[in-house]
Image: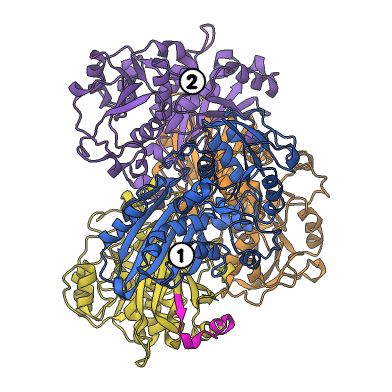
Chain colours: A yellow, B orange, C purple, D blue
Amino acid sequence: MVSVSIIGGTGYTGSELLRLLANHSKIEAIEHITSRKESGNSILKIHPHLKSMGYDNLCFEDIDLDKIDSDVVFCATPHGASMNIVPKLHEKGIKVIDLSGDYRFEDISMYEEWYNLKHTGKLNAVYGLPELHRELIKKADLIANPGCFPTGAILSIAPLVEKGIIEERVIFDSKTGVSGAGVEPSQTTHYPNVNENIKPYKITNHRHTPEIEKELNKLVEVSNKPVKVSFTPHLAPFTRGILTTAHTYLKENSLDITQAEIVEIYTKFYKKEHFVRVYDEEMVSLTGVRGSNFCDIAGFEIDRNGRLVMVSAIDNLVKGASGQAIQNMNIILGFDEKEGINYCGLKP
Amino acid sequence: MVSVSIIGGTGYTGSELLRLLANHSKIEAIEHITSRKESGNSILKIHPHLKSMGYDNLCFEDIDLDKIDSDVVFCATPHGASMNIVPKLHEKGIKVIDLSGDYRFEDISMYEEWYNLKHTGKLNAVYGLPELHRELIKKADLIANPGCFPTGAILSIAPLVEKGIIEERVIFDSKTGVSGAGVEPSQTTHYPNVNENIKPYKITNHRHTPEIEKELNKLVEVSNKPVKVSFTPHLAPFTRGILTTAHTYLKENSLDITQAEIVEIYTKFYKKEHFVRVYDEEMVSLTGVRGSNFCDIAGFEIDRNGRLVMVSAIDNLVKGASGQAIQNMNIILGFDEKEGINYCGLKP
Amino acid sequence: MVSVSIIGGTGYTGSELLRLLANHSKIEAIEHITSRKESGNSILKIHPHLKSMGYDNLCFEDIDLDKIDSDVVFCATPHGASMNIVPKLHEKGIKVIDLSGDYRFEDISMYEEWYNLKHTGKLNAVYGLPELHRELIKKADLIANPGCFPTGAILSIAPLVEKGIIEERVIFDSKTGVSGAGVEPSQTTHYPNVNENIKPYKITNHRHTPEIEKELNKLVEVSNKPVKVSFTPHLAPFTRGILTTAHTYLKENSLDITQAEIVEIYTKFYKKEHFVRVYDEEMVSLTGVRGSNFCDIAGFEIDRNGRLVMVSAIDNLVKGASGQAIQNMNIILGFDEKEGINYCGLKP
Amino acid sequence: MVSVSIIGGTGYTGSELLRLLANHSKIEAIEHITSRKESGNSILKIHPHLKSMGYDNLCFEDIDLDKIDSDVVFCATPHGASMNIVPKLHEKGIKVIDLSGDYRFEDISMYEEWYNLKHTGKLNAVYGLPELHRELIKKADLIANPGCFPTGAILSIAPLVEKGIIEERVIFDSKTGVSGAGVEPSQTTHYPNVNENIKPYKITNHRHTPEIEKELNKLVEVSNKPVKVSFTPHLAPFTRGILTTAHTYLKENSLDITQAEIVEIYTKFYKKEHFVRVYDEEMVSLTGVRGSNFCDIAGFEIDRNGRLVMVSAIDNLVKGASGQAIQNMNIILGFDEKEGINYCGLKP
């Protein structure tokens, strides 16, 4: 039994951590949950749906890193805020899972360029995508929990990149639900602007682009050309979920590969992975992963032009954030990796 | 550890039973799950979201009551079908939880009138609303699991009816999600007909009306007039959930009651009930109970005309069907009543 | 050919006025359209969907009542703002159609009580519901354009109230789309809070309540008791439209009336009204009036308890606001009442 | 003043023709509107939203080509049905606008391959995309009204293809509303399957692919390589609209082109086109074209990899079907091209 703390508990990722941890058999208590603005208030004021789930006496506190003595701390803080908090926890020897983008880049200059922020300094973080880095995660003290888009995008074509059968140019066309924009209202999330609509945004310059690219390139053999990722997200009229459509082209010397062989590559690549499910086109759906930690992958079709299409579906708040964070915690602490997150999608 | 069977496993209630039972610690196995049409097929063909949840080898079978030897059988069969199945299971001594309307009426003639069906004969069933009938449920062999609308409607004003402070006329104006219409497509559930719309249906003659009325009248003291229920449902553009707005009028001699006193009546009435939560107006929401077995109640306001308004929110497929069925099973078998269904709403 | 001006042009009612006036054959020009915040900017910055509709050179201006010389001015200003603008336009002899609540009450004290604002003083305004007050509107200089909820609520039972066959207590349970909350984002309109949800608000104290009541009571004969209106609105997950379910009880001496007779009463009452359509239950829908000035009415069913249910559907931004404003303008200026607003619903 | 007939009047394209023609100043009457199934019934039975729009006495008739004597006939018939009707009308000298795919291919073998149907024989049809073929349309007797996806896809990159600055491989990732699937209910359009979801379908083999490709290749100069179109549609949770994201790569010798120059190319290409509007990223939206005949185009951004992204938005039932059909009729008959279809989007 362990205790955990959550830095930044009023947002959707904080709320999802609480929702999932409420049924995690190894969690003794939420030691601290912080919020500057809501300090002193019951968490039920902000998260009323958690009533009667074991948190009725839990209150937000102002952040005080000295007081924190948990086995694991989740930083559900915004980009730029985490890097002022994580080092202190790290020093105290506390294991940290950071849900922001602050420690996702091995190369700080890349972070500074795409996030337009000065970084406080590199730490020895592991990119927390268990399907690719489980062995490193086991030994890590600091996990950089992956971005929501990168999780779905990377998993959708990792087996092909490793296999070296697709051209270097890859296009991800993603469709995300509105919860990805966070709890704060804005014109972007104003219901009449979202409903009956779908909009592209940051068409060519979303900062998840280099995160996807650098992770995929870890899979590329030296003899092959690195992947060049192009990424365009769209805001779609649903609350949860990211569907990513990956458009790739087969290399000329791989054009005779069949759909069945592609499926075989995926099945083999993910054969030990509980949280990746391989489907056919008709079966993949966002409701199938809603509220769940699964990443479902389908597609595998090849068209007249040698284009090979894959589609992945995740819940952006679970496999794309808090569920994956708990998966990482389970690995670090030696628990069953599925503990507390082994739910199927809430369908319909 | 027990084994259960599900008669009629292709619909939403069957699917929800499987979803919830997958994480129920006392269920050893789904012994049988039946479907005439899908007999021999994997349940994953119809419920692909259940992949990797322990059912990958489970197949639908044709119904064969002789073969069934489970501790509990859930009948997720349509109205009119259950009454041809339940008696045989009952005879074999198997405990049955019937999710249809077939055994909800003590008075068969009322069933025959409102369902326009000839009944095969009365059995000793208990109306499975644990908050009102827990003691009877504990000893029951056959549970008539309540209708979705009645669950939310009854719980929304039961404390007032028992207290005898409202007039006999009660109006329930309910708003239900589309999953209540089942898995079969029709003009009613055709997306362009539902989206950006809300429609009343069976404005004055929905068969849940007498079910609500006869249950509420069990709470009325002999000296008081029986409740007269008027009920109008609306089909609303969301998938899950029923919001019921109960419009009642205070009796003339109760007009000096305050909102705080009403809240106190509810708090007291439900103080031992884990699955009923009392909220204020701003806090009640369908997302707060989505995928959950909670019934949230709010409102308690009194207007210039002595009208007292209550609002209840449930997930029609969980507290309104499969979750409540499992709650009943837990009670019958002596398990912790919360086992396998203790989840908060999937919010947002 | 006339020229019009719009005071307060950045909101949804301003936008709808422009959308509809673009195809109004009698409008020569929008003389002025005001916005403090967007003064100097093209209206296309705020309303890009109006591009190529004749407004490409139209810019917002700061408000300057001295400059205004239009035949008609629409005040699409918030409650409390109109009463500081309208008197000056009125003095100049300009016909004004005010879309706020400021002039809807003959009795200023009622306004001050429900709006919690000090009023600047009564003017000779006509309540602009053409179906009830056409003759007065023809001669009016100042129109108080009705509220969105009152429009649908009043029209839904006006024939019954006039006929005197229902009891004095009336309950309106309304479901409104989110555009009714305006263009400014808030937690209330944040997509994840609205989607897959439906919420009651101002359960007993919405300020449209007395507006509905005083208008209905104009129809009550002296010998009859005045109507007592109870009203509960709900925020529903669609953008446009209000569905109002009116729950009334037949008087004891009218209990033998048939549904066909009720329909006859409505058909007769509205026989000269182009913008009121009488339907049966299955046919009424919000999409049927989306973008349209029609008010569709259905229901007319009587239940076991003598409850008589009516349902009305309007587009809150058209018949509930800007369309009705243009209808009023057409009447005042002697144009064909249908000019510029004779569209059916955008269905599906 | 002319009279028109509609073959196949119960679907969404038939309904939209009626909606738009109701306010078309040059239409004297709908001479015939056919439906086998609804023959003899009022059109209001199927299209109740059209009540009071001038069609209250219009009934569906069984198809009888001999009786038809209209100036123009719209064939709103399914693929495969039109080719059995159009030749007879054509022989009678009636101008026909066919909304099916039957006459869209100059090369019948391509039709037969992709539609898997035997064709009855080629006719002298013009592909009815006015922005590309206006001069041919003016003189045409038979118009093949374009497919919904092709309309948005072709217009989104036609200027680039003509200019010859992009590589031959083009990827269209489209998101369509559910009305594109027609009026008949199915699992695909069942509300709980669509809502809170987005699904790809016919990932690599949609039959609009060759239609897009052959039209774009009409714009390619002989010296350049033909375009190779890859197309993947997605079913998205809204009723109307298609957003198409076009992913293209600049040719190596065009990599120094700027976004401003791209915008200039589009502005010039479409400068005489009323129904194409050029926007920037933030402004494009489906609600901006809802119910409207506009095609809005935005994007024009170039990423690190030389990828150039364009986005187009149309209403699939208007510019993607019935509105464009009326636009074609206006051109053929010498009316103002905007007559009856000059509406902006219903936003919000």
Membership of A110 in magenta stretch: no
> Callout 2 environment at 10 Å: few (<14), some (14 to 19), or many (20+)?
many
**Label 1 – label 2 distance at C-alpha:** 59 Å
Picture quarter containing residue C162? top right
Q: Is residue A185 visible?
A: yes
**Residue linked to disc 1:** D172
Q: Determine the chain carrying the residue at label 2.
A: C
Amino acid tagged 2: Lys
| Horizontal side of residue B221 vs A12, given as left or right | right
* In the foreground, D197 or B7: D197
> Callout 1 environment at 10 Å: few (<14), some (14 to 19), or many (20+)?
many
Membership of A251 in magenta stretch: yes
The C terminus of chain C - image quarter: top right
Q: Position of residue B107 (x, y in %)?
A: 76, 41
Q: Position of residue C267 (x, y in %)?
A: 62, 20
Tag nearer the camera, 1 or 2: 1
Picture quarter containing residue D299? bottom left
Q: Is residue B306 visible?
A: no
In the depicted structure, whether residue B157 falls above or below residue A338: above
Q: Position of residue B214 (x, y in %)?
A: 67, 39
**Magenta region: which residues?**
A248-263
The N terminus of chain C - image quarter: top left
Helix, strand or loop under label 2: strand
Amino acid tagged 1: Phe
Q: How many marks?
A: 2
* In the foreground, D303 or B26: D303
**Residue linked to disc 2:** C228
